[in-house]
Amino acid sequence: MPNYDPEPKMKFTFGLWTVGNPGADPFGGVVRERISPVQIANLLGEVGAYGVNFHDNDLVPIDATPAQRDQIVKDFKKALKDNHLVVPMATTNLFSDAAFKDGAFTSNNAKVRAYALQKTMRAMDLGAEFGAKIYVFWGGREGVESDATKNPVEAIKRFRAAINFLCEYNINKGYNYKFAFEAKPNEPRGHMYFAVTGSYLAFIPSLDHPEMCGVNPEVAHEHMAGLNFVHQVAAALEAKKLFHIDLNDQEFGRFDQDYRFGSANLKHAFFLVKLLEDYGYNGSRHFDAHAYRQSGSEDVKSFARGCMRTYMILKEKAARWNTDKEIQALIKEINVDDSELSKLSKKFSASNAKKLLDAPLDRVALNIGLPYEKLDQLTMEVIMGVR
């Protein structure tokens, strides 16, 4: 029996807000006792995680005094050391406080935008204290319910100005953060700016420091919009902009469910793991998910273990798919190459264009049957464990 225990090289991480989630939702209050950051570190150490990430106020309450902040930081550092945990990523909560009810960087109010920058700089300072090297931006309130309320062109400009400012702060302080933008199509705003990963991939080249910026795509956010998450991650990988990734699961078209990784769409999860492993992704594999509301404290541990175990199982199945002789024979069959035509179409020249125009390509002959049903069935059998 293969060993599916988490391995440090996989860099499995959880947020303080994930395993620490007390189970509240818009229709009901907390169902689990709230646990402290130190208790969360102890839990993650017990289940074998690699690291823990946080928003500023997950760790330090927004109204904490300087003395309280220092004590919290000291206690948490000790808990990290005791549990052999690291902090690879940090982020800012720019969505919970009432000040951000109409956005942070895109707010119509210059004082709110200034406060958002101030809060983020302080949060970057906090993350740097723990050695974080990835800084995530999720614009939880960057959007509208009615386009009468905000100019979307100005909103993009405001967001760009904020990121450019923070890039310079990053350089000035020598933090060496990589910024990772996280898209979401809706919720909590009726209409969110930068709704999908592609929105940020298009936005990044317009920044003053595009080399510093990439994306942090999340399974649930793309599935909410009915998109194929694997394709979004592939676009980020191909652009060399996959700086971080949020793993969870989600029924298509529903509210943001943040289910345990692989629990809703196992086939999509398989191809996601296969993509990450085939292309040698070496960043954190961060589980931005919550245990079911019905779970008690022990079941939260089962949730955390389950996220990591499912990834490890799918990693092994992806390796099996890659070495299955029948599957690989079908892959070879359906990938038809022609070295001469590939050479002509690889790079434009007037000569290559003329040769392609003159090439005897018979469209009728190109209509050949492809064994995609067989290939997909064999894939399902690998996933289901019968191959």
Image: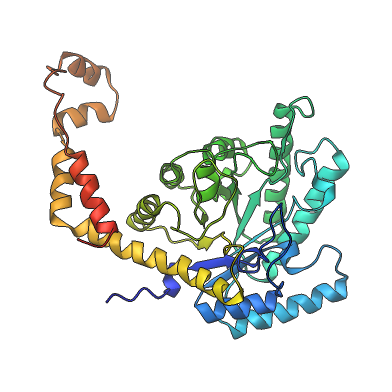
Say above or below: 70 vs 121. below
Image point 66% across, 71% down: which residue? Answer: 130
Total numbered circles: 0
Q: Is residue 215 left or right of residue 126?
A: left
Q: According to the image, what is the colour scheme of the structure?
A: rainbow
| In-front residue for pair 198/252 | 252
The image shows residue 312, relative to residue 224, as above or below, that is below
Question: Residue at horizontal 22%, vertical 48%?
Answer: 377
**How far across and how far down the image is residue 229, in percent?**
45, 45
Q: Residue at x 68, y 78 (%)?
A: 38
Residue at point 25% right, 51% down? 379
Residue 231 in percent (x, y) is at 41, 42
**Residue 217 appears in the rendering:** no
- Tell me where residue 105 sits by quadrant: top right
Q: Position of residue 368 (x, y in %)?
A: 14, 28
Q: Quadrant of residue 322?
A: bottom left
Name the outermost residue toward the bottom. 82
- The picture places residue 103, in percent across and down from the top left corner, at 77, 42
Considering only vertical position in the picture, is 220 above or below 351?
below
> Image check: 329 left or right of 232?
left
Q: Quadrant of the N terminus?
A: bottom left
Kindly tell me whether residue 120 is visible in this rendering.
Answer: yes
169 vs 302, nearest the viewer: 302
Quadrant where the C terminus lies?
A: bottom left
